[in-house]
Image: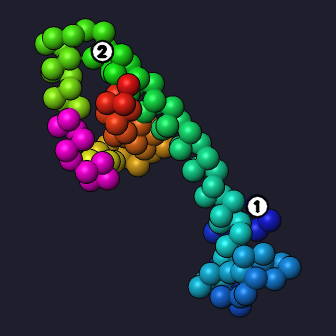
Amino acid sequence: APYDPLADDIINALAPPSREHWFGTDQIGRDVFSRVIVGSRDILTVAPLATLLATVAGTALGLLTGYFRGIVDDVVSRILEAFMAIPVVIVALLAIVALGTSKTTVIIVIGLSFAPIIARTV
């Protein structure tokens, strides 16, 4: 990042985009472009890993349900339907509040929140 994303510069507060600050500055003079760069690092690691976890867990559950017919199919299907009946965002927010906001927790919560959708597709 070209500037410290946390450094305040009140003199340059709310500056428009320029050569020095490509996206301008915010209310307390922090460079917006530097903040976007720093923030995108987290997103570019969390999103692919959560998607991979959802795909692997959902595929495993879907294959398990498809291979073992009868009682296993019924039980797993009802559990997945119960999870899908509750809005994903509410479940994810409650889990993150209960477990903490580390990257690992966010990846696991997002991945497992979307696994039932993948499992039903498989």
Residue underneath mark 1 = 1
Which mark is first along the chain, 2 or 1? 1
Task: Indicate the amino acid at tag 2.
Answer: Gly
Residue 43 placed where, x, y %?
Answer: 57, 50
Label 1, label 2: how many angstroms apart (C-alpha)?
49 Å
- In magenta, the rendered stretch is 81-90
- On the question of residue 79 being in view, the answer is yes
Residue 72 — which label? none
Q: Is residue 3 above or below residue 93?
A: below
**Residue found farthest to the bottom:** 11
Q: Residues within 10 Å of mark 2 (few under 14, many from 20)?
A: some
Helix or strand or loop: what does disc 2 sit on?
A: helix
Q: Is residue 42 above or below residue 81?
A: below
> Residue at point 33% right, 21% down?
61
Q: Residue 119 sits in which quadrant?
A: top left
Task: Indicate the amino acid at tag 1.
Answer: Ala
Helix or strand or loop: what does disc 1 sit on?
A: loop
Q: Is residue 12 toward the left or the right of residue 20 in the image?
A: left
